[in-house]
Amino acid sequence: MLDFDELRELAADVRVFVDLAEDKAEALRTIIAAYDVVLAIFPSHEGMGLHVVKGGEILHKIAKSQTNAMYSHTAIAVPDLEHAEVLKYLTTPVEQRIAA
């Protein structure tokens, strides 16, 4: 079960980390590399939209097995779904993009 308040707090922490960094792109790459699952959150008609930036296979395995596996996670606030999709594309290793 997702806790939207927790995701908002995580995204706020990420925003502060990135804002304080000299190299914002590197800070974002560092955040994404450090976690098993990274969710992009954005405003939507339903309240909050979610897009999996990293770790979709982990979430799929957990859902299939119906277990509570341990994994690290964070959230990154973006303005909309398009930005979330671009973030996922830009942070996916080139080898995986070519294989897809």
Image (cartoon, grey):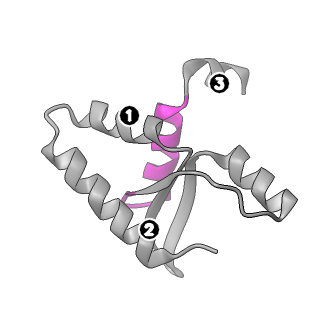
Please state the extent of the stretch shown in magenta in the rendering.
Answer: 76-92
Q: Secondary structure at mark 3?
A: helix
Please tell me the numbered disc located at residue 7: 2
Residue pictured at 36% horizontal, 34% vertical: 30
What residue did someone put label 3 on?
96
Identity, as a three-letter code, of the amino acid under mark 1: Arg
Above or below residue 86? Residue 65 is below
> Which quadrant would the C terminus be assigned to in this image?
top right
* Marks 2 and 3, how far apart at CA: 27 Å
What residue did someone put label 1 on?
29
Upstream in sequence: badge 2 or badge 3 = 2
Residue 84 is inside the magenta segment: yes
Q: Main secondary structure of the magenta part?
A: helix
Residue pictured at 45% horizontal, 55% vertical: 74
Above or below residue 90? Residue 46 is below
Locate residue 63: give its quadrant: bottom right
> Residue 42: image x %, image y %?
43, 65
* Marks 1 and 2, how far apart at CA: 18 Å
